[in-house]
Structures are given as C-alpha cells and as structure tokens.
Image (spheres, rainbow, N blue to C red):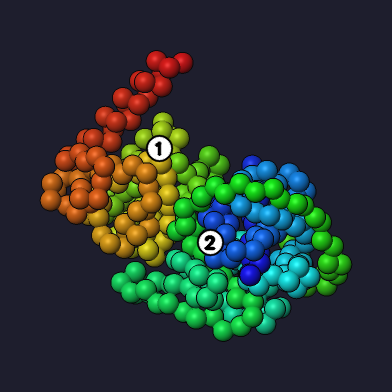
Amino acid sequence: MSHIGVLIETDENGVRPACYGAVTAACKSGGGTVSAMVLNIDPDACRGDLEAYGVGRVIGLIGKNPDMKAEAVAAAVKHFGLSALLGISNAFGRDILARAACLLEAPLALDCTAVDLAENRVDKSHFSGKTIATLNLCGPIPVCGLRPNVIEPQKAPVRAETTVFDADIQDTGRIRVLDVPAGRKGRIDLTEAEIIITGGRPMASSENFAILEECAEVLGAAVGASRAAVDAGYAPHSMQVGQTGKTVSPKLYIGCGLSGSVQHFAGMKTAKIIVAVNTDKDAPIFGKSDYGIVGDLYEVVPVLTEVLRGQRAEDR
C-alpha cells in the first residue's frame, strides 16, 4: 500500500484551489494515507479544507527560502516513509519539487497531464499536444508535478490528523528572498478563475484586448488568449490558454474569435459551460460549445458588457 505526499501551496485565502486536483490524483493512485505538506502555516488552519478531499494527515513544515523549503519537504518524505511526492507544476511547485527530487535522488517529471503512482507512470504532452508520451519513473520515490486543473477535484471526506515536523534545517545563507512582488492589482489568476473570457487572432492588436478587459471587469472574470494571439504579439504568454499554455477549469468560458483547435480545447475542456463568439458559423469551436453566437466579437462583446453592467446596476 502506497502512502503519497502532496505539496500544498497556500496564500492569504488558504489552500490554492489547483492543489485539490493533486490531492484527488494522489487518492486515486494510492490506497494508503495521503499526506499533505504545507509550508509556514498552521496545519490546523487548512485541515478542514484538505480532509474534505481525502487528506488523512496534514504536515506543517518550516522554511524561509526555496532551499530550506525543499530540504524540509525531502526530510518529511523520508521521515514519514512516503512512497511518492506529488504537487502542482506551477512556479511554486516546479521550484520546490525539483529541489526536493535532487535531495531525494529521485526521478522527476513535471507538467504531467496524468499520473498513476501505483505503477509509477505519468503522461506528458509533446509537440503542442499532438502526441502523449507515457513515462515509467524508475526509482523508489517518484516526484511528479501535475499541470494545474488537468484533474478535476473530487471530495472524499476523511478525518485528518495534523502534525508539525521540525526537520531542523539550517539556513546556509545561499539564498535570500528579498521580495515577493504581488501580481497585477485586481487581476484574477487564470488557473483559479470561475469565469474566463478569451480572445483569439481576430483581436488584431494588444489594444483591442481592452474590450475583453472591460467585459471581464463587469463579470469578475479573468482574461485569456489563444496561442495564435500570443504568437502574434497581442498578449503575453502568461495569458495563454491551451496545451502549450495554461490549463483552466472555470464554471464559464467565453471564447471570442477562437477557431477551436485541438491544442486550445485541451487547455479548457473541463470548463462547465462554454460560450463561443465567432463570425464563421462553421468554426469547430461551435461543435464543442454549449452556446454559440455567430457574430463579430467587436459588436457582441460591448453589447454583452452593457447588458451585464445594467443588470448589475439593477441588482444594487
């Protein structure tokens, strides 16, 4: 029976939502106790949220910088006899998981689209999502990073115990964290947004994304971009949704001027409701959408914004 550890990222709002998908993956791959490792936070503060998804043990760790955090994680893996380490393949996860894998002398696979830790197998996409490679990880403690939102979280309530593990890690002074700059004020993280409005190549310029930004402000949504729009220089890569960008799982996804490529759909296929706006009635995106509007996004989106703004005013 395997006992899998999951690296959990937290912020001022608690557990980052994408981490619940990693917990679900661990529960399905194991059979034993799933241990969640949280850094620099009281484990009791997030026990309730984590045990709702199947975590049986919450381990609190301390670390001032990436080196110390990774050492604490690696020490906990050894101390608690964990058979695998799983996390999310974002900036935080890539940093800590890679360092921990080195300390554990363990095989590392990041940006995975599926994992089977019972068999030490993972899937990774290649060539812009055209192929999927299945990798066998040879080693006693595989370390894996999942793409955010590729696994839909599933609740599996259990009772979790909490513990604080002091690994007695010494600060070598090799790394000093001077500052952690906040993201753009008011911008919602794509991977955690409940509503996303995305623009494709027809946006034609970075300035035209203001149309989507205005609608997003009214909706409380995040703004995304297709690979074509990013490659054309209309939006930064941080906004890209798709196989080679971010994987998202919102309740509502509005695609404006998107063709509906396989690569883009792979990054948002778990959206609960998909709405497409396109002038081409034969665009593939309509075959994948719950609702479709055949029209010019430059006409449709401003009208949608005004209607929503009016409804919001009435609700006040």
Q: Which quadrant: the N terminus?
A: bottom right
Q: Nearer the viewer, residue 166 or 238?
A: 166
User: Count of labels shown?
Assistant: 2
SS category of the residue bearing label 1: helix
Residue shown at the point (35%, 20%) measured from the top left: 310
Can you identify the residue that label 2 sits on?
A: 28
The amino acid on which the numbered mark 1 sits, given as a three-letter code, is Ala
Residue 67 to residue 220: above or below: below
> Residue 184's x, y, as percent?
54, 46
Q: Nearer the viewer, residue 207 or 213?
A: 213
Can you identify the residue that label 1 sits on?
A: 216
The amino acid on which the numbered mark 2 sits, given as a three-letter code, is Lys
SS category of the residue bearing label 2: helix
Residue shown at the point (39%, 15%) measured from the top left: 314
Residue shown at the point (54%, 65%) measured from the top left: 29
> Residue 309's x, y, as percent?
37, 24
Tell me if residue 298 can be seen: no
Give the mark nearest the N terminus, 1 or 2.
Answer: 2
